[in-house]
Amino acid sequence: MKILLVSNFEGGFQPMTVAAATTPLLKAGFDVSVLDTYVDGIQEDRFVGQDLVAISIPLFDALFAGIEIARLVREKNPSAHITFFGQYATINAYRLAGKYSDSCVVGEFETPLLALARHLSGDTQLMLPGLVTTEVIEKGETIHPYMGRDEIHIPTRSTLPPLHKYPQAQVDKLMGSTQIVGTTEIARGCHHKCLYCSVFAAYDGKVFLIEEDVVIEDVRQLVKGGMTHLTFIDADFFNSKHHGVKILRRLHEEFPELTYDFTLRIDHILENKEILLEMAGLNVAFVTSALEFPSEEVLDAVAKYTSLEDIEEAIAFLLGTGIKLNPTFIMFNPWISLEDLATFRAFVERNNLDDIIDPIQYETRLHLYKGSPLLNTASVQALELTEQEFHVDWKHPDPRVDELYYASLTPQEEGIFKRCCLKC
Ligand code: SF4
């Protein structure tokens, strides 16, 4: 039984989703190989002779390329079973399975992928948890996301392209030198329920911890691979802060030169000042925080449960710790006015953020995925909306705001969603 795991984009990082999916399949004795088209291109010959091709789509930016890969696999190898997995597979399973693939994993992917591989190997009596198949769709059944708290294995990194193939300009800028960046996670999901967020859509407030020893062992192999800086790709590192501190202490003892960054909510920064001061001493170099937009109306509209005052307090606090801030925004959103864009400029200048903001942040636009809770809110329902296959396009009530947005894009970028965090 030959299995090909394909990644096309994981935020420009070495794809940890396929690394995590590989281990249980290898342990069960399957012949597994990996293709990351982001760095190695679409090698169509690799699709031939595979029994199962599983395409990872953890981010919105991976969705359309993933569909194109599925089309090419079908062309080159019509008998292969094609499936999708990852966060955007969970959100779009019923739009993908049957049309672009034979099945789609919903929820945590390791156990459903293993069950699918065993099923395709002949164990047809096996239950297929968390798997939306063509048959399921034909019968009109509903499959709940698989959220079993199974063992999470150490990701297999030996089958992935080396870390140096994944340069990270924003990390280099914040660190002031070129880094070899690796990623890992201490938990999956998020306890919070920000209305626009795809993590909320996929996990509904649930969080799964990854065992301390698994994280440490994964970091050891990343360091062996040349990593000098580690980005924790958790939706919010303080979803499990005590777990995180324990891991950072152990890592700092074993790798005193290694530096770190992770994502944090503004309220978590303010509630955990002592812990952050300790973390500064453990080489946490910067934190990414989704500031959304410096306006109470926007913060309320997305249910962020923070205020402009909190944001400015958190920025000032971090300044005194030595931990830098990597702010992200949803720059173009339906709740701003043209004047707010000028206010934004003043906010950036007042807080000395201009030099550290990733330029891509000036082009981010609210993404309304199908099923987003925002679509049920009065302020979004009042917009001119156009339904697309996987998302809903919206127009700003003031056409001048949209004109500014489109003017900020180069032609090839038009229509491409810009990420505001590592998980969207
Ligand atoms: S925006 Fe961040 S804090 Fe809010 S639900 Fe998403 S991952 Fe969690």
Image (cartoon, rainbow, N blue to C red):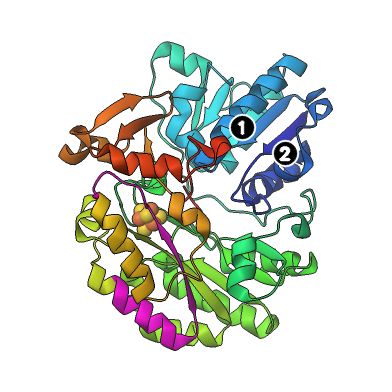
Does the numbered disc 2 mark a residue whose Cβ is under 8 Å from ligand 1? no
Residue at the image position 36 percent from the left and 82 percent from the top: 316
Task: In the rendered view, tell whether residue 62 sits above or below residue 17.
Answer: above
Dot label at residue 13: none
How far across and how far down the image is residue 193, in percent? 30, 52
Magenta span includes 142: no
For the residue pair 355 and 89, the one nearer the viewer reads as 355
How far across and how far down the image is residue 368, in percent? 35, 37
Please give the residue where the numbered disc 1 appears in the rendered image: 65
Side (left or right) of 206 relative to 171: left
Amino acid type at mark 1: Ala
How far across and how far down the image is residue 375, in percent? 26, 35
Q: Secondary structure at mark 2?
A: helix
Count residues near mark 2 (Cα–Cα under 10 Å), then give few for <14, some for 14-19, many for 20+: some
For the residue pair 388 and 35, the one nearer the viewer reads as 388
Magenta residues, start to end: 311-337
Side (left or right) of 320 relative to 62: left
The answer to whether the residues at label 1 and label 2 have Cβ atoms under 8 Å apart is yes
Task: Note whether residue 233 is visible.
Answer: yes
Dot label at residue 37: 2
